[in-house]
Amino acid sequence: MTEPRSTVTGPPYDAIIIGGGPCGATAAAHLARRGRRVLVAERLRFPRFHIGESLIPETNRYLRQIGVFDKIAAEGFPVKRGAILLAADDEHESYANFAEAEGIDGPTTWEVPRHRFDEILLDHAAECGAEVYQETRVTGIEIGAEEVRVTLRSEEMGERTVGSRTLIDASGRDGFLAKRLKLRRFDPQLRNVGIHAWFEGVVPPPPDCAGDARLISLDQAGWAWLIPLDDHKTSVGVVVPRERHARLPTESPEECLDLLLESVPTLQRLMAKAQRVSEVRIDGDYSYSTTAYAGDRWLLAGDAGSFLDPVFSTGVLLALSSGVEAAEAVDRGLHQHGPGRERTFAAYDREQRRQYRFFRRFVTGFYRPEFRDLLLRPGDRFRLSEGVVTVLAGNTRPSLKNRIRIEVFFALIALQRHFPLVSRLHDPSEYGRPRPGSGGARVR
């Protein structure tokens, strides 16, 4: 392994990237393929467990852009063609068919065990020319007028300080830089808790939907996922508001998950013979954004900048897209000085905010019962489902006709709240009741 260079004669790297997950690996590969000198510091040893196994089709665009698409396709992961949307009562369902979506990079994608998917991306970054250091912690950062100095520590190298012209923080939910600069802002409408594990023996989807994720809408503003990882294992998780989780009559993660699974008729049927084959994990405070995604010589990318409730599986897409966009901003910024670089980084900042707000509208909508009523009973008279599925497939810039369809869809949701256009699937008391923390909430 090459030893990091010191800063005796000036910054040797064009970019140092904190974190080797999908975002950091994507940014590193994209910069390295452009001839930039890149160092990646990853605190763990890959492969490692990570949640978020379900991709959406627009992810393909960025996998192709960094040259790793064929490596992912060769792994034989389950092919995902859409998403099966189910009600908790086990009587209503609909299907989001990605073939209906416009402007995406192909109608199919995959369900991916993240330990393997992430390892492929990080190995690819190294093959592209990035210097990758695993089990390496960043212990200090100094952002100066001419360079960024980063202190690294590992058992192999001890402690060294290296210099770079720019820094990309892709440290995930750890948020190395965002926390130190006090930039993180939790979303008051999405303070949820996810409880999840892997199971065998789950009733599989129908054969023509064998690789599709199933999303179950729960009463009391929650949802569950069933994601096939191979012919035997299924990722199973339940997401509920933090206050509901706190009211569960147990603190054991295993008992919490069992109680939630047993309370839902749809899950009772699908999980009747299932056996858990992994530990149960809990993730809290699912959604946050940041007051700034970029500053002088630094950018936040992926979950280090913002994280959105994963109900529509946007996590990996936003990680890869922001990784590519951060790399392109750095690449352009290296040719610029002062105001020019500031404008480039400011444009990156605006784009991250736009994408977060775009998907957030659908995520917060999903937690309203009237949104789920219509989503589970889509009508095609005006082909509204095409507009919605276009978003669910990952297109954040739909055409005018689909933007109109989306606005009509949200208008019908507003009507459904007060005048049932379709029969209601949820407790009547849920309609018109605000989500905790929703009063006056703003997203930057």
Image: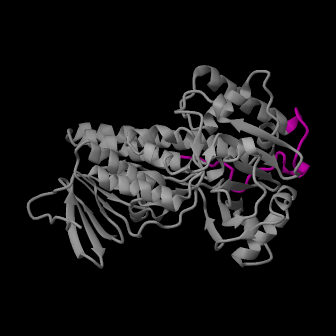
Residue 325 screen position, x and y as percent:
39, 41
Residue at x-position 87% and y-position 49%: 426
The residue that appears at 80% across and 46% down in the rendered structure is 369
Which quadrant of the figure contains the N terminus? bottom left
Whether residue 227 is visible to the viewer of this picture, yes or no, is yes
Give the residue at x 46% y 52%.
302
Magenta stretch contains residue 66: no
Report the colour scheme. Answer: one colour
Instruction: Count all numbered tags in the image, as a single digit.
Output: 0
**423 in relation to 116, above or below:** above
**Nearer to us in this view, 43 or 163:** 43
Q: Is residue 408 left or right of residue 58?
A: right
Location of residue 281 (image quadrant): bottom right
Q: Residue at x 57, y 23 (%)?
A: 399
Residue 131 placement, left or right of 384: left
Image coordinates of residue 283 in percent, x first then y, are: 61, 66
Question: Is residue 424 within the magenta segment?
Answer: yes
Q: In the displayed image of the protein, which residue is found farthest to the left?
A: 9
The answer to which image quadrant residue 203 occupies is: bottom right
Q: Is residue 6 left or right of residue 379?
A: left
Q: Nearer the viewer, residue 443 or 330?
A: 330
The magenta stretch is 418-444
Query: Relative to 433, does residue 249 appear above or below in the rendering?
Result: below
Main SS class of the magenta portion in the image: loop
Q: Is residue 305 visible?
A: no
Q: Position of residue 284 (x, y in %)?
A: 62, 65
User: Can you give x and y, in whole percent of width and height, for residue 108 in the image?
Assistant: 59, 38
